[in-house]
Image (cartoon, helix red, strand yellow):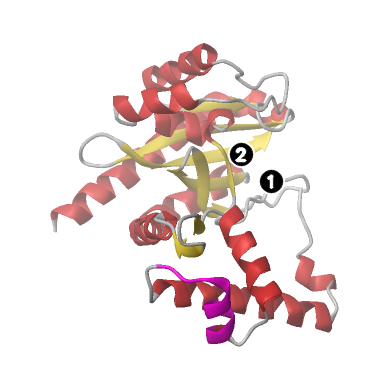
Amino acid sequence: MTEDSPDATASPARRDREVASVSNAMRLIEALGRVDSSGITELARELDLSKPAVDRLLSTLMSAGYVEHVAESRKYRLTMKLVAVANSIKDRTGLIDLARPKLLELAEQFHETVNLGTLYRGAIVYADSIASRQMFRIEPMPGSEHPAYCTAMGKVVLAHSPADQLEQYLRDFRAVPYTRFTATTAGELRDRIEAARTDGFAVDDGELVEEVCCVAAPVLDTSGYAVAAISITTIRSTFTRSRDQMAKAVVEAARQVSEAIALAESR
């Protein structure tokens, strides 16, 4: 399953507007980063933008969780999400370098899409992906995300997370039933997570997209907690035939990446 890039068909004028919008959003973030908080008037003056334009940018950034409104002062400030993103990027950069050779090996062995993902705010964020060459394929973009509870990577990372973090996740759990196979109660999800902990890998048996299945294994730090997961994604018919072989291979690949992390940290 592939998607055409929206930029490929956009008119030059539209592309220019989109680039300008992104540029202005980044300038606004930088401006807020220089102060504790600021109002629309001050931001409009500093950025040389109209107040309505600044208001639209602030609304977009608030929806994304990067900016918050301070009711008492009627001003805006950055949230800690930027710190979390910065730390996540810093941690993932070395991880991607260590994991990519194993992702390529799995992709070559099975000719299916192979992914590296990390858990962030209850979602699996795709840090890297090697696309399948099959006619029907899933191609997650780096930076895209899916809920942890209906993905193999999400469940296996949760299975190897600190107990308090897992319990908090289960307390906050609210499901969207994407398919008839999606876990919709905390008890059902807990059972799947415990199975992943016991087996050493997790499966997504059509829980996000009914005819798409995955198997994932955890990449562990030296404390034994998951810092990421590696998965193989394929269609149901292929998964039914090759599940055991894929599970064995992805567990071994994740184990080797875990060892590489431990070695890198010991230097």
**Please, what secondary structure does the residue beneath circle 1 have?**
loop
Identify the residue at horizontal 41%, vertical 34% (top origin). Answer: 157
**What amino acid type is highlighted by mark number 1?**
Ile
Q: Is residue 235 left or right of residue 203?
A: right
Q: Nearer the viewer, residue 250 or 193?
A: 193
Residue 120 shows in the view: yes
In the image, residue 12 sits, relative to residue 82, either above or below, namely: below
Q: Are marks 1 and 2 in contact (CB under 8 Å)?
A: yes
* Label 2: few (<14), some (14–19) or many (≥20) C-alpha neighbours in 10 Å: many
Q: What residue type is disc 2 on?
A: Thr
Q: Position of residue 11 (x, y in %)?
A: 85, 78
Q: Residue 236: where, in percent of width, then height?
A: 70, 28
Q: Which mark is residue 233?
A: 2
Query: Magenta stretch containing residue 6, yes or no?
Result: no
**Residue drawn at (54%, 26%), measured in percent from left and top?**
203
**Vertical side of 247 occupied by 47: above or below:** below
- Disc marking residue 175: none
Q: Quadrant of the C terminus?
A: bottom left
Residue named by callout 1? 138
Q: Residues within 10 Å of mark 1 (few under 14, many from 20)?
A: some
Asked if residue 13 is positioned above or below residue 5 in the image, the reply reads: below
User: Which type of secondary structure does the marked residue at label 2 adopt?
Assistant: strand
Q: Which residues are magenta?
A: 37-46
* Furthest residue toward left: 267
Prevailing secondary structure of the magenta residues: helix
Q: Quadrant of residue 213?
A: top right
Q: Position of residue 150 (x, y in %)?
A: 59, 29
* Residue closest to the eye, 55 or 182: 55
In this figure, what is the number of numbered marks? 2
